[in-house]
Image: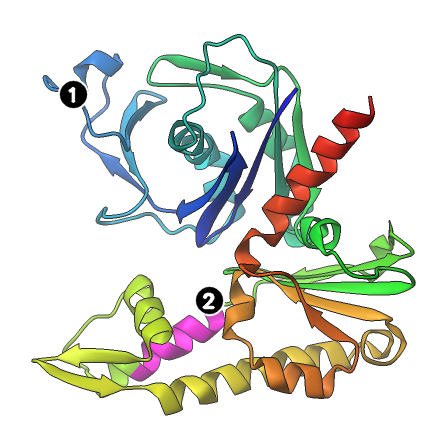
């Protein structure tokens, strides 16, 4: 059984399949009008990121304009098959080779009530007149569980996972490896919060420029911007934003005394973990640790390892 692990984040899609580990932006836009057949997409060979889905043409991945707003579960329930199909193509998986495959993915605790709907839309779909059918082998894990499974350190006792995603912040609890559902919670205060603050700073300083979230994220990561040939540093502002978000997170954790004072381990990870003040985290959370770099792949590695190991035991 071949395992395909895909972490469909609201910012990036992370993939581990066919011996490849990679990511691409969660970006989709509608292209053109409704059509009936893939062969009508173009008189020439269509771009590799252009797909026919439900009678409409779409572009997926980077370098597209007017990308849809990705920050809600209805977006995933409508368009996740496009992201999965694009991932399969980038992983060079031949869907006609007759192999049995299991798709493993995840959903935030915030959206976990949609598990059945999410699994159904991913189980069987047509794109470019090609059938993708996992025949019921779609496994959905709670976002953050992959971080727990891929963590290589001691996980005995009470362990919390703090998964800072782009849109959601998920906190999961485990006792000797078993989940504690009553202690798991999530909200929509992920890394986008700090990027929105960065965007506001930029637009206040350069009110004649309309900054997209993607551009604000690029500036946040590089800590600078070039305007009319002049390089302007935002290093100080960014350090303040990181400290502010870290303090917000610590205050949230402080409302749960068991996390700060009873937990044997608190694992921080997710793509938003790069935005945290790591020294401040370790100073205030005495049992804190971070997952292996790169943080954004911790979930997808855990998804893959869990089901790959279980399959090997059968």
Is residue 190 at all visible to an observer of this figure?
no
Disc 1 residue crowd, few under 14, some 14–19, many 20+, Cα 10 Å: few
Residue farthest left in this picture: 228
Tell whether position 129 is magenta: no
Q: Nearer the viewer, residue 279 or 169?
A: 279
Q: Pinpoint residue 219: horizontal percent, then vertical percent.
A: 30, 73
Q: Pinpoint residue 125: horizontal percent, then vertical percent.
A: 48, 19
Q: Is residue 103 left or right of residue 211?
A: right
In terms of secondary structure, where does tag 2 sit? Answer: helix
Q: Residue at x 72, y 87 (%)?
A: 284
Is residue 309 at all visible to an observer of this figure?
yes
Tell whether position 200 is magenta: yes
Query: Which label is found at residue 282?
Result: none
Q: Residue at x 38, y 91 (%)?
A: 236
**Residue beneath disc 1:** 45
Q: Nearer the viewer, residue 234 or 212?
A: 234
Q: Is residue 83 above or below residue 71?
A: above
Q: Is residue 28 above or below residue 178?
A: above
Q: Pinpoint residue 225: horizontal percent, then vertical percent.
A: 22, 78
How far apart are the alpha carbons under marks 1 and 2? 37 Å
Badge 1 or badge 2: first in the primary sequence? 1
Task: Specify the quadrant of the image occupied by residue 228.
Answer: bottom left
Q: Main secondary structure of the magenta part?
A: helix
Task: Specify the quadrant of the image occupied by residue 113.
Answer: top right
The magenta region covers 192-201
Query: Which label is found at residue 192?
Result: 2
Q: Pinpoint residue 18: horizontal percent, then vertical percent.
A: 51, 29
């Amino acid at each position: 059984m071949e395992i395909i692990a895909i972490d469909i984040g609201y910012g990036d899609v992370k993939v581990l399949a066919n011996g490849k580990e990679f990511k691409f932006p969660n970006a989709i836009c509608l292209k053109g009008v409704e059509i009936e057949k893939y062969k009508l997409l173009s008189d020439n060979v269509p771009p590799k990121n252009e797909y026919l889905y439900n009678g409409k043409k779409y572009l997926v991945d980077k370098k597209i304009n007017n990308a849809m707003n990705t920050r809600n579960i209805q977006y995933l329930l409508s368009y996740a098959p496009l992201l999965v199909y694009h991932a399969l193509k980038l992983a060079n998986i031949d869907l006609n080779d007759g192999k049995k495959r299991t798709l493993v993915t995840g959903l935030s605790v915030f959206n976990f009530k949609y598990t059945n709907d999410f699994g159904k839309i991913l189980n069987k779909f047509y794109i470019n007149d090609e059938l993708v059918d996992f025949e019921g082998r779609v496994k959905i894990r709670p976002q953050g569980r992959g971080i727990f499974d891929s963590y290589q350190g001691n996980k005995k006792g009470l362990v919390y996972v703090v998964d800072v995603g782009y849109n959601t912040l998920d906190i999961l609890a485990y006792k000797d490896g078993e989940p504690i559902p009553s202690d798991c919670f999530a909200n929509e205060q992920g890394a986008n919060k700090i990027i929105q603050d960065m965007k506001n700073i930029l637009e206040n300083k350069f009110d004649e420029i309309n900054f997209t979230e993607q551009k604000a994220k690029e500036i946040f990561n590089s800590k600078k911007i070039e305007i009319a040939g002049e390089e302007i540093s935002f290093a100080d502002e960014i350090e303040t934003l990181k400290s502010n978000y870290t303090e917000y997170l610590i205050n949230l954790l402080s409302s749960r005394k068991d996390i700060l004072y009873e937990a044997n381990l608190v694992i921080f990870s997710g793509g938003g973990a790069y935005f945290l003040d790591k020294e401040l985290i370790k100073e205030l959370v005495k049992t804190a640790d971070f997952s292996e770099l790169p943080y954004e792949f911790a979930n997808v590695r855990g998804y893959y390892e869990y089901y790959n190991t279980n399959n090997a035991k059968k």
